[in-house]
Amino acid sequence: MGPAWRKFAGATLPALLTVLLAIALWAYSRSVYASGATPATAAAALPSGGGGYPPGALVGWLMALFVIAPTLLVLWIAAAPPLVFPVPRISFAYVLLVDVAGLLLLAIGAGEARVPLADVGALYLLLAAWIGACAALAAFLRRWGAGWSAALPLTLAGLCMAAPVAAMPAIHAAPAAGPLSQPHLIALTTHACPMLAAIDALGAAGPNPASPHLDWGTLPLMYRYSGLGQSIPAQLPRWWIVALLYGSAALVLGTLARARRPSPVAPDSPMASPAAAA
């Protein structure tokens, strides 16, 4: 009972670190924007008027959450011993992390920023699908070692998060027609980036005056480093389509990971037979 409890207690580490980092980042952004509030920033504040920080502060915090949560879970999965495939512990760590992220969205999004509950629910589903896809890929790659299990998912996740910037050279060079035309690359880029879907999710409640209205093309990072929504017309992807894509990827990769789990099983694994443990 004791060893099993310690193994599952270790699975709480990604969720605990996510809570600490997310709360610290929100407190920092709140203090920065509150201390530097001006009439201009107060006019652009979220509906709660919480300290005079603009909606971009919420988007920045969401971006940090979309990076921190899957990164910590992927690193935790990759750090497991190579011959052990702890399916119950990985599932427990994922469910706990997603639920904790949902509580953070509820407390900070709905509580502090007064974001409608429909928007918070959409963000929760999108974040769960995004974390699941990253974690499932890490679990699938564990049989090839910790390096592949950590490096490839984090690299692909980084490219997806930075897609509106990283894909700009290809978009500029794309022809106007054909299978790799500029409209096709723009659609691929926007649907690969979960943060663009998160901005769309902030309007999931429809024409609700309580939803923060964002000119996403002029957000600081988009305005400085990407031309989407500015010189290159683009539409935000529908959040539920992106969530469905990443959720499907998580389901397929998770199934393959279970089917291709490492063998033989280590003696100390929960899946080891009594004879092997002896």
Image: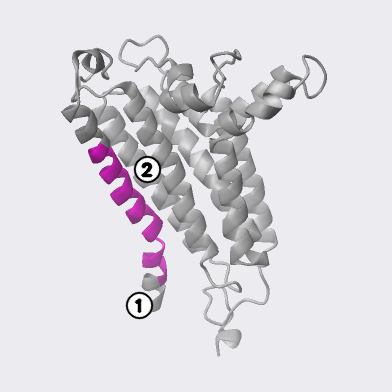
Q: Is residue 116 visible?
A: no
Q: Which sits in the foreground, 254 or 65?
A: 65
User: Image height check: is 46 above or below 126?
Assistant: above
Check disc 1: other Cα within 10 Å, few if <14, some if 14-19, many if 20+.
few
For disc 1, the marked residue is 2
Left of 261 or right of it: where is 6?
left
| Residue stretch in magenta | 7-28
For disc 2, the marked residue is 101
Check disc 2: other Cα within 10 Å, few if <14, some if 14-19, many if 20+.
many
Q: Which sits in the foreground, 29 or 258?
A: 29
Q: Earlier in the sequence, mark 2 or mark 1?
A: 1
State which quadrant residue 160 falls in.
top right
Q: Which sits in the foreground, 125 or 36?
A: 36
Quadrant (top left/top right/bottom left/bottom right) for the C terminus: bottom right
Inter-mark Cα distance, 2 to 1: 28 Å
* Coordinates of residue 106 in the picture (x, y in percent): 30, 34
Q: Residue at x 73, y 23 (%)?
A: 173
Q: Label 1: state its secondary structure.
A: helix
Figure disc tally: 2
Q: Of the residues tagged 2 and 1, which is closer to the observer?
A: 2
Q: Label 2: state its secondary structure.
A: helix
Pick out the residue farthest to the right.
178
* Coordinates of residue 41 in the picture (x, y in percent): 25, 17
Q: Which sits in the foreground, 229 or 200?
A: 229
Q: Residue at x 26, y 23 (%)?
A: 114
Left of 188 or right of it: where is 4?
left
Q: Residue at x 48, y 25 (%)?
A: 224
